[in-house]
Amino acid sequence: MSKPNFIIFLTDDQGYGDLSCMGATDFSTPNLDRVAASGCRFTDWYSNSPVCSPSRASLMTGRYPGNAGVRSILAGHRMTTGLPKKVPTLATALKELGYATGMFGKWHLGLADGSRPSDHGFDEWFGFLAGCIDYYSHIFYWGMNHGGPGNDPTHDLWDNNREIFENGRYFTELITERAVAFIRRMAQRGEPFFLYVPYNAPHYPMHAPRKYLDRFPNLPPDRRIMAAMISAVDDSVGAIMAEVAKRGMTDNTLVFFQSDNGPSRETRNWLDGRQDPYYGGTAGKLKGHKFSLYEGGIRMPALMSWPDKIPPGQVIKEAGAAMDIFPTCLKAAGGNPSEYELDGRDVLPMVSSGAPSPHGEIFWEMGNQNAMRRGKWKLVLNGQLVEGAPPEDAVFLSDLEADMGERRNLADEHKDVVEEMVADTERWRAGIEKRWREEWQGK
C-alpha cells in the first residue's frame, strides 16, 4: 500500500464543549462530526500546554514544551525567536521519508529567520507568524494598549517568506483556499503529503462574515460570534475533506483535529471595551480555561480518522496528548520513532485495535502551576482559575472517572496518592528546569 497522507487541523482557543459531537447543542459542526463518525473522537485527549506557543511546539516536535525549547507565549515582533532549529519537527521527519509538506495558517513558533516554517521542514507555507491577527487586515495589534516601544501594529501575512497583502479577505477562508490548492497539486504529482492547517479561529479578535453570523440569529452576541467563527472552520474542513474525496485519497489519509488550549476568558474578546471576563466559549463540564492546568485549560476536543486503519464510530476514553501525533504519524509513514527524542507515544494501536493508552502518566507545567495525570487520578499544584490571581488550592487531587469537572478535592482523603504524585511531579518539573537552564536559556 502507498504511504498514507496526513492532515492535521488545529483550532485556537476552542473549548472542549464547542463542537457538536462533543456535546454542543446551540450550534452544529456537521463536517467535523463526519470526521469523528468516520473514525473516532477522544474524550480524554490533551494539549501539552494551556497556551498557544508551547502547545504548538509539542504538537510539532512530539516533546513536552520544556523539552522542545518553547514554554511560554512568544512575542509577535519580527525579531522574535522561537522553536530552536535543532529540534526536529514532524515536517522535517516526514520530509526525510519522501513527503511533500505544507502549512497554511497560524505558526506562532517564531518570526525571526531560523524560526519560520521553512526553517522547520515545510516546503511551502502561507499565513502569519505572531499570536493573532485581525481577520481582514491581517495586522497584529496585540501590544498596542501596552504602550512603549516595539508595540506598534505590525502587518503579518506571508507567502513562503514573502510578505503579501490580501486586505479585506477573511483569513479562515484564505487558509482553506491554500490548503485545497495544495491537495490538488499533490494529487497531480502523486506524492504523499503532510498538510498542517492551524486555524486561528476562534481566537480573538472576534470576526466573522455576515453569512456565518446569520446562521445563529437567536444566540446571544458573545456566543453568536463564537458559533459563527467555528462554523466557518467547519465549512473549511468540509471543503478540504471534499477535495480529498474528489482525489480518491480518503481511505489512505490520516486526519487529526484538536484545539490548542481551552477557551479564552480574556476581556479583549469583547471588542467593546467591556472589562468583565469573556464567556463566549465553553469547556463544557470541565473546570478551568486557557492559562489553567485544570481540565478546561488542557483537555481538548479531538478527532482522528483513517478509514484504512481506524474503525469508524469509536469513542476513545483512553488518554492521549498532542505530543503523540509526531510518533503516530511517523510510524504510520514507515519511520522509526526511536530515532528521535520524543515524549509522545504512538497511539495508533489505541485507536485501531482497542489498546490501552501508551502513557502511564502525563505532566504539565505553566508558570507556578504543575499538573499530572496517572490513570484516573489528576493532581494540580497551585492551580489557577483566574490569571494573576492566587492559586485556588495548593494541592488538588481529583478522580476524573467519577468527577471529570474536578469539583471535589480528594487530597485529604488520599494522602498516599498525593504524596507519590507530588514527588513524581516535582521530580519531572525539576528535570524540565535543569534542561531549560543548561540548554535553552539564552538560546
Image (cartoon, helix red, strand yellow):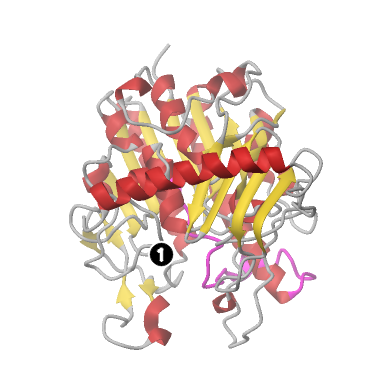
Q: Vertically, is 2 above or below 394?
A: above
Relative image position of residue 220 (x, y in whole percent): 76, 74
The residue lying toward the viewer, choosing from 93 and 186, is 93
Q: Residues within 10 Å of mark 1 (few under 14, many from 20)?
A: many
The residue lying toward the viewer, choosing from 350 and 231, is 350
The residue labelled by disc 1 is 131
**140 left or right, relative to 14:** left
Q: How many marks?
A: 1
Magenta segment's dominant SS is: loop
Q: Which residues are magenta?
A: 197-220
Reply yes or no: does residue 281 show up in magenta: no
Please name the residue shown 19% across and 52% down the image. 114
Task: Residue at the far left: name it.
Answer: 113
Please name the residue shown 57% across and 28% down the image. 360
Reply yes or no: does residue 200 show up in magenta: yes
Callout 1: SS: loop
Q: Amino acid at mark 1?
A: Gly
Q: Vertically, is 224 above or below 421?
A: below
Relative image position of residue 25 (x, y in whole percent): 80, 54
Q: Is residue 440 visible?
A: yes
